Image (cartoon, grey):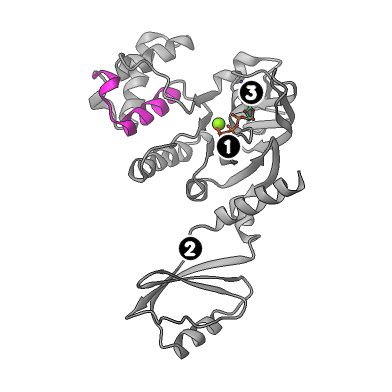
């Protein structure tokens, strides 16, 4: 298969048992298409970092196959690694170095000549909105800037596949949104992105395809849209004009609760007619000013899948 047709990442029946006997991966298979934005979701200890560690050659697999753009990591590890940029979960650059040096030195590990590395560093630091900090001690960067520096550094080698392990863990929503924008731009420019995240909202807003992994096995995978469509429950929030009555109307098959003093929260089966809801609201004198879909559908799916598997285990 030529490199352009091959998946950006192909993982086949991947297994990992650590020395202490923990079976972290129990036969994981997945394909990530070139150009995709792919999420790996899973609870703590699911095996996400183990999977990423194996793909990026930081962890040895017990068995199975890993191909990066058609290159088997066992056959030519260096060639596979040259196509990957890794952003590990923990900040791991030297806080006493400057962003420019961090980027240039990183390129040096990959044998990129210094003059070329300097030019590239200017590009990636500008893209990360860090060019004005290029000569400042990294320690003095804000938390969000440090995260962006991690991404900028990984982009030094122009990787065709960028892998990020919980890139936004512990950063506030504003910084997270800024990073989403950066990642979308990197993806739009042609880089395939795989990320792990605990933030379901992050996966929903960024990724086209995803795998949900639990206890070392994939419990669901496919396009984000078709996974969400599988859900048979829909949630809505209604902004209410005036007060909310003390006794809420009963709507058969649905669950209506008070979210706050001007918002009602409704969960209802997908097949149910919204007219019934409005009829009940009218009868109770509730005036709806606006309504919106709840953004927690992926969360419902996630909880359902991982707890179902848990019960079966
Ligand atoms: N170096 C190691 N030695 C032994 N066991 C390990 C090692 N690294 C991970 N594990 C175990 O393997 C399992 C999977 O861990 P992993 O770090 O891959 O999960 P994760 O999905 O990344 O979790 P989190 O969301 O908490 O980062 C866990 O049970 C963990 O304790
Ligand atoms: Mg992890």
Identify which residue is drawn at 41% across, 22% down.
153
Residue placed most toward the observer, 139 or 151: 139
Mark nearer the N terminus (1 vs 3): 1
- The residue where tag 1 is placed is 44
Residue 81: image location, x then y, percent: 58, 19
Q: Are marks 2 and 3 in contact (CB under 8 Å)?
A: no
- Where 29 sits versus 246, above or below? above
Looking at the rendering, the stretch of residues picked out in magenta corresponds to: 136-155
Which residue occupies the foreground of this view, 94 or 122? Answer: 94
Q: Which residue is mark 2?
A: 294
The percent coordinates of residue 306 (x first, y second) are 66, 47
What residue is pinned by disc 3?
54
Label 1 secondary element? loop
Foreground disc of the pair 2, 3 = 2
Quadrant of the snapshot with the N terminus: top right
Looking at the magenta stretch, what is its main secondary structure?
Answer: helix
The question of residue 138 being in magenta is answered with yes
Look at the image and say whether residue 171 sits in the magenta stretch: no
> 245 above or below 94?
below
Numbered circle sitting on residue 255:
none
Q: Which quadrant of the structure image shows residue 71?
A: top right
Left or right side of 199 for 58: right
Mark 1 or mark 2, earlier in chain: 1
The residue that appears at 43% across and 14% down in the rendered structure is: 107
């Amino acid at each position: 298969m030529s490199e352009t047709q091959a998946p950006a990442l192909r993982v086949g029946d991947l297994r990992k048992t650590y020395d202490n006997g923990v079976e972290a991966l129990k036969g994981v298979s997945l394909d990530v298409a070139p150009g995709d934005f792919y999420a790996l979701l899973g609870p703590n200890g699911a095996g996400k970092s183990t999977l990423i560690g194996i793909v990026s050659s930081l962890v040895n697999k017990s068995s199975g196959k890993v191909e990066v753009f058609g290159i088997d990591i066992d056959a030519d590890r260096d060639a596979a690694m040259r196509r990957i940029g890794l952003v590990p979960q923990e900040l791991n650059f030297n806080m006493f170095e400057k962003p420019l040096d961090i980027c240039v030195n990183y390129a040096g590990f990959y044998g990129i000549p210094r003059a070329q590395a300097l030019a590239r560093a200017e590009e990636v630091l500008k893209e990360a909105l860090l060019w004005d900090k290029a000569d400042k001690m990294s320690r003095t960067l804000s938390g969000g800037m440090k995260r962006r520096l991690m991404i900028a550094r990984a982009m030094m080698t122009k990787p065709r596949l960028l892998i990020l392990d919980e890139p936004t863990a512990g950063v506030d929503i504003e910084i997270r949104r800024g990073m989403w924008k950066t990642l979308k731009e990197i993806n739009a420019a042609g880089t395939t992105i795989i990320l792990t995240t605990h933030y379901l909202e992050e996966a929903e807003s960024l990724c086209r395809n995803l795998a949900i992994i639990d206890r070392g096995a994939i419990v669901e995978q496919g396009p984000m849209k078709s996974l969400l469509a599988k859900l048979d429950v829909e949630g809505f929030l209604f902004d209410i004009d005036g007060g909310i009555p003390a006794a809420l109307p009963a709507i058969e098959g649905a669950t209506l609760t008070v979210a706050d003093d001007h918002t009602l929260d409704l969960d209802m089966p997908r097949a149910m007619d919204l007219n019934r809801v409005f009829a009940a609201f009218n009868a109770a004198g509730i005036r709806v000013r606006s309504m919106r879909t709840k953004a927690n559908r992926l969360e419902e799916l996630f909880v359902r899948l991982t707890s179902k598997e848990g019960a079966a285990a």
